[in-house]
Image (tube, grey):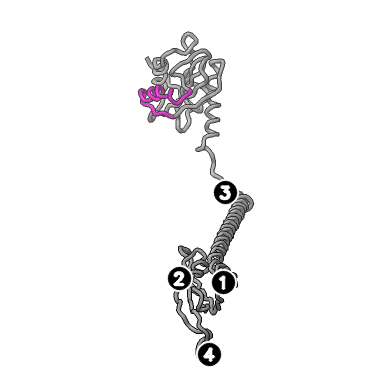
Amino acid sequence: MTHDLVPQETPIAPVLCLVCAAPGWALGWRGTDMALTEQAWPDSLPPVAFPTDLWSPALQLALREHWGTPPPLCLCWAPAPKGQNLSWWPGRRRRLPPWRALAREEGLTWAGATAMEAVQDLTEIWPQAQRAWANAEVSAPGSLRWPGPVALTCVSALVCVCVHSALQWGIRPWIQEQRALASAQAEQDRQAEQQRLLRERERAVQVEQVQRTRQWAMWQSESLRPLQSLAQVLGQTDTMAAPQFWQALRYADGAWTVQGVASHESDVQPWWQWASFGGTSQLLESAPGVWPPEPEWGWPAWRFRARWSLTGTNQESP
């Protein structure tokens, strides 16, 4: 049986297209006004299994009418019929492997898939697919024309102006503001630290002054104790039987030294111990002599020299 080959108006790079919709399916050359085959689904519904037996004969017939190398196969689909959940119906990338396997079994290369709007009649399948392919070609990135030199220069200038404006009036003022805030905060922290150090130094000076004042008062009190005791002794000399004459009073090395002359009739040791102020007293010299001293005409007298010191006290001066 022979078939008359009817020449088709095919594009320069022919692409064989298979279209699936709710009413049926169609097969033809992409870019032509009429499809090679348009058929409704058996029982008016798409089969549950992948319908290879429907498309394989139609593909073989279309390839028999094509001269040259095998063309690529593309797919175009509309939404599936309502109420049917077909695992092979295109619409997701994971559902395309059966279609790629069909193209591979027929010796064709895979050219991708395109979605189209829903159709209600079998005669609308191919025109709707043509419109979907046209829209896909217009919106495809490869179909965009590169702008000319003038347009490219304008676009570049506009981009530069936008970037410069953003840097000049947006980013730069923000950076300067952040720097000013950071500098002000650092200056505030520095001043606060200086104030804290100054307060601590003032408190330390005050504490040291109080301690030195207390120490000085203690030293003064301890140093005045021997002098006060001597004042008591001097206050009671009038009540003693024999008069005393005080010649010298000296303070050195934390002790008071008294040198004087008493009547030869008095015993210096008893009243000297009696006049002790509670510290350590020591009679350094007690011997007879004359008063006034030679070469003057003197009277018998009793010379004495005694030392008073505080026991267990710090005698360093402040």
Picture layout, residue 91 above or below residue 239: above
- Name the kind of residue labelled 2 in the image: Gln
**Do tag 4 and tag 3 residues touch (Cβ < 8 Å)?**
no
Closer mark to the observer between disc 2 and disc 4: 4
| Residue at left offset 41%, top offset 26% | 66
Closer mark to the observer between disc 3 and disc 2: 2
Q: Residue furthest right?
A: 169
Bin the neighbour count of mark 4 within 10 Å (Cα to Cα): few under 14, some 14-19, many 20 and up: few
Q: Estimate the spatial distance between the alpha carbons at disc 3 and disc 1, rounded to whole Å.
A: 129 Å
Residue 158 shown left or right of residue 64 in the figure: right
Q: Find residue 290 and report its horizontal and vertical position in percent.
A: 50, 84
Check disc 1 and report the residue beneath it.
240
- Name the kind of residue labelled 1 in the image: Met
Closer mark to the observer between disc 1 and disc 2: 1
Note whether residue 167 is visible. Answer: no
**Front in this rendered view, residue 90 or 260:** 260
**Front in this rendered view, residue 315 or 225:** 225
Closer mark to the observer between disc 4 and disc 1: 1
| Residue at left offset 53%, top offset 90% | 296
**Do tag 3 and tag 1 residues touch (Cβ < 8 Å)?**
no
Bin the neighbour count of mark 1 within 10 Å (Cα to Cα): few under 14, some 14-19, many 20 and up: few
Picture layout, residue 204 above or below residue 146: below
Q: Which mark is residue 282?
A: 2
Check disc 3 and report the residue beneath it.
152
